Image (cartoon, rainbow, N blue to C red):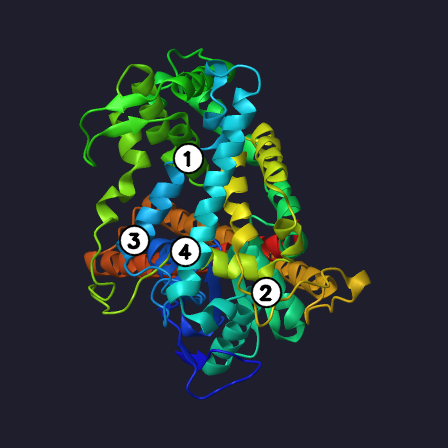
């Protein structure tokens, strides 16, 4: 889909070609409810990939009533032009690989190896190294990146792209399901175009107000529940026992025991990296930072927890191959091949620049730009004390310290009605009324089902009484009469079963609509 690069100062020769993907609705036409836009988060996540990965699951949850639609935001994956900060995808992957392989401050502080001020000095040296990578990223984008797109990839511009998609579909209002950063995108759409909102599901809510005003505070808020999720990993491992979790030594292994052993692994690798001589991605070493990154990525997907536990248990037993392969899966993507050498013949760039172009455009840069390197080091320690994944969040956020591209448009509030935020077209009271109506429909369907069941029982009793009376009177049913009676009975049963199945389906649909409405209200 071809759209304007700059909505505020449109020029016919400055065009963005938006990549979209749709999974069509499967419900009967009379039950379809239009399009549902989805966003996987990031910022910088590919929407077209999300439709492939999870579109079918979302459609099942929604009873197939929506066309599931998503797109690659500006600077992401198949949408063109690409940001072009890196010459090849391999260069982009290697850059992220190199950033991760300088480790994290917990590793840099060195544990018992360092004495006195040595730990702080090493931590500060690490912070300067991290800052150099941030400067290199900004410089790469200044040197060869698409200058206009680097200033027009903000969330506000993505929102305007969403309005253009709605208009092209001929749909007046937005139905939307956003995850993580996608909740910020959804909130921004509602703030900018409240009259174009129908239903929004904000799943895994992130603070839009903090995201747009103070990156450091946004990072702090991001730590609110991460340790609860990590504790969930430890608890579920303990509950599963040895059959379900490799870190559970017995059926009575406690969550604390599992957590303490992971901490010992981290501390041991902090001082002495683990050598891996052979793996599917080549030889190398494991550091304590690799454990942190593995935990960080796994917390997003509980289905990956058994594999994480298996890798950590193997490392505890002296085999680091599985964890090394998990930590270095991108080693197979380092080739410097032509970025158009793929089935689409389009760049599929999704780099750290994609994230920075959105995130660092959206926020008020004063909080990060005015911070000293000592303050940055202290921030890493603060988030590291809040969560085992805190330092990774801090590394991500501080990317914006050296980002020099200013957004052509950024929405930074208001975020509350008291400050001037306009309400969306559908109020809470209207949603409450819709839930009440759905409950009334459900009650009517359940009553209908009950009455249908009683009618079936009464009919069966009548047939049984007729057969019994015929038997008592010595009468028999002739084969034609018997066949006719059986056929009629079978047709009656089939018809009533179809009616019951229809009622069950309508009840399930009513349940799904009620759940979605309650989710929209935060109930």
**Along the horizontal axis of the image, is 441 left or right of 470?**
right
Q: Residue 129: horizontal and vertical position, in percent? A: 46, 39
Q: Earlier in the sequence, mark 1 or mark 3?
A: 3
Report the front residue among 132 and 508.
132
Of the two numbered discs 4 and 1 in the rendering, the one whose residue sits closer to the viewer: 1
**Along the horizontal axis of the image, is 195 left or right of 55?**
right
Dot 3: what SS? helix
Q: Residue 423: horizontal and vertical position, in percent? A: 73, 68
Reading the image, the residue beneath label 3 is 91
Reading the image, the residue beneath label 2 is 199
Vertical comparison of 346 with 255: above or below: below
Of the two numbered discs 2 and 1 in the rendering, the one whose residue sits closer to the viewer: 1
Report the front residue among 113 and 434.
113
Q: CA distance from mark 2 to mark 3?
A: 41 Å
Reading the image, the residue beneath label 1 is 293
Reading the image, the residue beneath label 4 is 60
Residue at image location 31% in from the left, 57% down from the top: 490
Of the two numbered discs 4 and 3 in the rendering, the one whose residue sits closer to the viewer: 3
Residue at image location 59% in from the left, 50% down from the top: 205
Of the two numbered discs 2 and 3 in the rendering, the one whose residue sits closer to the viewer: 3
Locate residue 175: give its quadrant: bottom right
Vertical comparison of 191 with 334: above or below: below
Whether residue 23 is visible to the viewer of this picture, yes or no, is no
Q: CA distance from mark 2 to mark 1?
A: 35 Å
Q: Earlier in the sequence, mark 2 or mark 1?
A: 2
The local crowd at label 1, few if under 14, some if 14 to 19, many if 20 or more residues have their Cα within 10 Å, is some
- Do labels 1 and 3 touch, CB within 8 Å? no
Dot 1: what SS? helix
Of the two numbered discs 1 and 3 in the rendering, the one whose residue sits closer to the viewer: 3
Q: Residue 351: horizontal and vertical position, in percent? A: 38, 55
Report the front residue among 213 and 181.
213
Dot 4: what SS? helix
């Amino acid at each position: 889909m071809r759209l304007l690069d700059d909505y505020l100062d449109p020029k016919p020769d400055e065009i963005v070609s938006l990549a979209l993907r749709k999974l069509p609705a499967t419900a009967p036409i009379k039950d379809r409810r239009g399009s549902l836009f989805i966003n996987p988060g990031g910022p910088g996540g590919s929407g077209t990939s999300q439709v492939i990965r999870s579109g079918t699951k979302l459609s099942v949850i929604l009873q197939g009533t929506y066309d599931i639609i998503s797109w690659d935001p500006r600077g992401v994956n198949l949408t063109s032009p690409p940001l072009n900060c890196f010459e090849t995808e391999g260069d982009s992957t290697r850059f992220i690989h190199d950033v991760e392989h300088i480790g994290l401050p917990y590793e840099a502080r060195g544990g018992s190896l360092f004495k006195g001020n040595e730990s702080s000095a090493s931590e500060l040296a690490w912070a300067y190294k991290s800052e150099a990578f941030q400067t290199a990223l900004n410089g790469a984008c200044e040197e060869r990146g698409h200058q206009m797109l680097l200033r027009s990839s903000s969330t506000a511009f993505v929102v305007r792209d969403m309005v253009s998609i709605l208009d092209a579909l001929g749909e007046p209002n937005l139905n939307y399901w956003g995850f993580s950063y996608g909740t910020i995108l959804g909130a921004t759409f509602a703030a900018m175009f409240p009259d174009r909102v129908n239903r929004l599901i904000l799943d895994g809510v992130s603070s839009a107000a903090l995201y747009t005003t103070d990156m450091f505070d946004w990072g702090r808020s991001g730590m609110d529940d991460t340790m609860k999720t990590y504790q969930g990993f430890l608890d579920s491992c303990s509950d599963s026992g040895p059959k379900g979790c490799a870190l559970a030594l017995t059926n009575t292994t406690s969550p604390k025991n599992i957590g303490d052993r992971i901490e010992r692994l981290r501390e041991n690798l902090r001082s002495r990296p683990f050598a891996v001589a052979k793996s599917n991605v080549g030889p190398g070493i494991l550091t304590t930072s690799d454990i942190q990154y593995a935990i960080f990525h796994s917390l997003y997907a509980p289905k990956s927890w058994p594999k994480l536990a298996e890798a950590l248990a193997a490392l505890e037993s002296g085999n680091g191959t599985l964890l090394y392969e998990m930590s270095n899966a991108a080693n197979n993507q380092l080739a410097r091949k032509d970025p158009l050498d793929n089935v689409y013949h389009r760049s599929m760039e999704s780099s750290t620049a994609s994230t920075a172009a959105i995130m660092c455009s959206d926020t008020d840069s004063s909080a990060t730009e005015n911070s000293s390197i000592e303050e940055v080091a202290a921030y890493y320690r603060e988030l590291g004390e809040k969560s085992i994944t805190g330092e990774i969040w801090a590394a991500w956020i501080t990317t914006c310290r050296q980002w020099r591209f200013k957004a052509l448009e950024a929405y930074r509030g208001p975020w509350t009605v008291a400050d001037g935020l306009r309400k969306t077209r559908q109020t809470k009271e209207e949603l409450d009324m819709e839930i009440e109506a759905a409950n009334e429909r459900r009650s009517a369907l359940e009553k209908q089902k009950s009455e249908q069941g009683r009618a079936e029982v009464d009919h069966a009793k009548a047939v049984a009484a007729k057969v019994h009376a015929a038997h008592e009177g010595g009468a028999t049913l002739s084969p034609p009469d018997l066949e006719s009676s059986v056929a009629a009975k079978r047709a009656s049963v089939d018809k009533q079963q179809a009616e019951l199945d229809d009622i069950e389906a309508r009840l399930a649909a009513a349940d799904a609509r009620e759940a979605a409405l309650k989710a929209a209200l935060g109930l």
